[in-house]
Amino acid sequence: MESVLIKAEKKSDISFLIALAKKLGLSAKALTKAEVEDWKFAQKIDAGMRTSSVSRDEVMKVLGK
């Protein structure tokens, strides 16, 4: 499975893209800001799991603290 993340500023653009995806037989879902932040955090965790160590500063930066 492949995914595409598209950022749009207007809700009308998001609605159009979701409708287009459905017409093409694809699934689509609008993500909330929290869901996007969770996804970014998960990406950082995955990247960290492939390294020998992650600094405390990097962890705090991702957490926004």
Image (cartoon, rainbow, N blue to C red):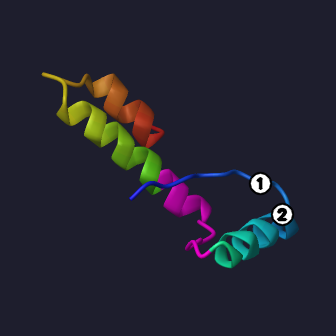
Q: Badge 1, how many Cα within 10 Å: few under 14, some, many 20+?
A: few
Graded by Cα atoms within 10 Å as few (under 14), some (14 to 19) or many (20 or more), the crowding at tag 2 reads few
Q: Please, what is the three-letter code of the amino acid marked with disc 1?
A: Ala
Residue positioned 67% across, 70% down in the render: 21
Q: Residue at x 70, y 51 (%)?
A: 7
The CA span between labels 2 and 1 is 6 Å
Please, what is the dominant secondary structure of the magenta stretch? loop
Q: Amino acid at mark 2?
A: Asp
- Which quarter of the image is occupied by the C terminus? top left
First to last magenta residue range: 25-37
Q: Nearer the viewer, residue 4 or 55?
A: 4
Give the numbered dot on residue 8: 1
Taking the magenta stretch, the answer to whether it contains residue 26 is yes
Do callouts 2 and 1 mark residues in contact (Cβ within 8 Å)?
A: yes
Q: Earlier in the sequence, mark 2 or mark 1?
A: 1
**Between 21 and 10, the one nearer to me in the picture:** 21
Residue at left offset 18%, top offset 24%? 51
